[in-house]
Image: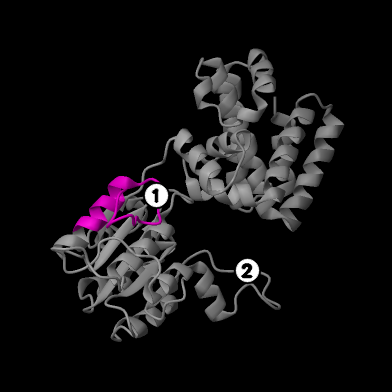
Amino acid sequence: MSGSGELSWPIVGHERAVGILRASIRTGRIAHAYLFTGLEGSGKHTLALAFAMAVNCQADPPPGQDLPDVPCGICASCARFSRGSHPDLVEVNLQTQAQAQGEGSGKNKSGPAKELRIDAIREMQANVGLSPHSARWKIILVDDAEKLNEEASNALLKTLEEPPAHTIIILLAPDEGSVLPTISSRGFLISLRSMSRESVAQALTQKWGADREQAELLAALSGGRLGYAVRLMEDRDGMDRRRTALQELSVLSGAHINDRVNTAGRFAKMFTEQRPALYDLLQDWEGWWRDVIAFRVSAPELVVNVDQLPVLESVARKHSPQGALAAIKLIQDTRQQLLENVNPRVALEGLALGMP
């Protein structure tokens, strides 16, 4: 990605998306609403902030342009957008909603809401009509857009139908189908694709100082999502939990019925006290069995747990693809039962007893 002079966007990969946004700035065809789509950790939020920097950069434009299409990164505006602290940046997401309403603190044991509600959008609307404080464009960044409930979606739709001048609304969601068609149709779609493993690994070694072996593992585990790979790199406890989860699965495979029941009891306690960690464990188990299938169908390049290749190869010789698929379905069914408030001990006993 070349920029003006030696400058470039503070983005790794996603050249196509950056090229589209740069062209919109150069031609003056900046939309009032955008929908950035991509899996968690794919770089949507980073791209949105880079775009906010670019459209508000205070540097001199290159010859023949009214505005710079590459953020300088050093002017006061770029610096504040980069930090997420610009007065003309309004962020709306589950976290800001929880902070505004005091959820997940004190005596409230239910934690933050799982959907974006109308109050969060109304608060945004009260701000969106105001002129920018110091930037050319006020940026409204709606993360977790797929979590908008019906009331919130309808309220947001009114703003998208009559967007205020000098305001850009950027919605972030996993995919176009996760928001209402009436909303997605009013935003210019920018879809972020997964990066290659090699590109992610190279970025981790060059920009984040990972060693090659670590970078290759993180690139595989991330599924081509650089942001997710960086979070994994920084989350040492999370990587330790993954190793423990795979060890649990290995021990369970040869365990007797009493040990399996005891394991289910520990998992039920985990469900009560460390629910996110249990869901992570189930995800790690599901990924393991997918890797077993990859070995059985002679597609080792699809393996995610690349630090476990000898063990995976051994396990794959003992289980058919159908058996691995049955294990994956059991894990998925258990996860769904837990989400539907089935008795966790019963659901997890079924899982522990049914694992190959």
Which region of the structure is painted magenta? 1-23
Q: Mark 1 = which residue?
A: 38
The residue type indicated by label 1 comes to Gly
From the image, which quarter does the C terminus lie in?
top right
Tell me if residue 213 is in the magenta stretch: no
Q: Secondary structure at mark 1?
A: loop
Residue 119, position in %: x, y? 43, 79
Q: Mark 2 = which residue?
A: 111
Q: CA distance from mark 2 to mark 1?
A: 26 Å
Quick one: 8 or 80, which is closer to the camera?
A: 8
Residue 299, position in %: x, y? 50, 19
Label 2 crowding class (10 Å Cα cut-off): few <14, some 14-19, many 20+?
A: few
Q: Is residue 248 left or right of residue 136?
A: right
Classify residue 256 by image quadrant: top right
Residue 2, position in %: x, y? 30, 50
Q: Secondary structure at mark 2?
A: loop
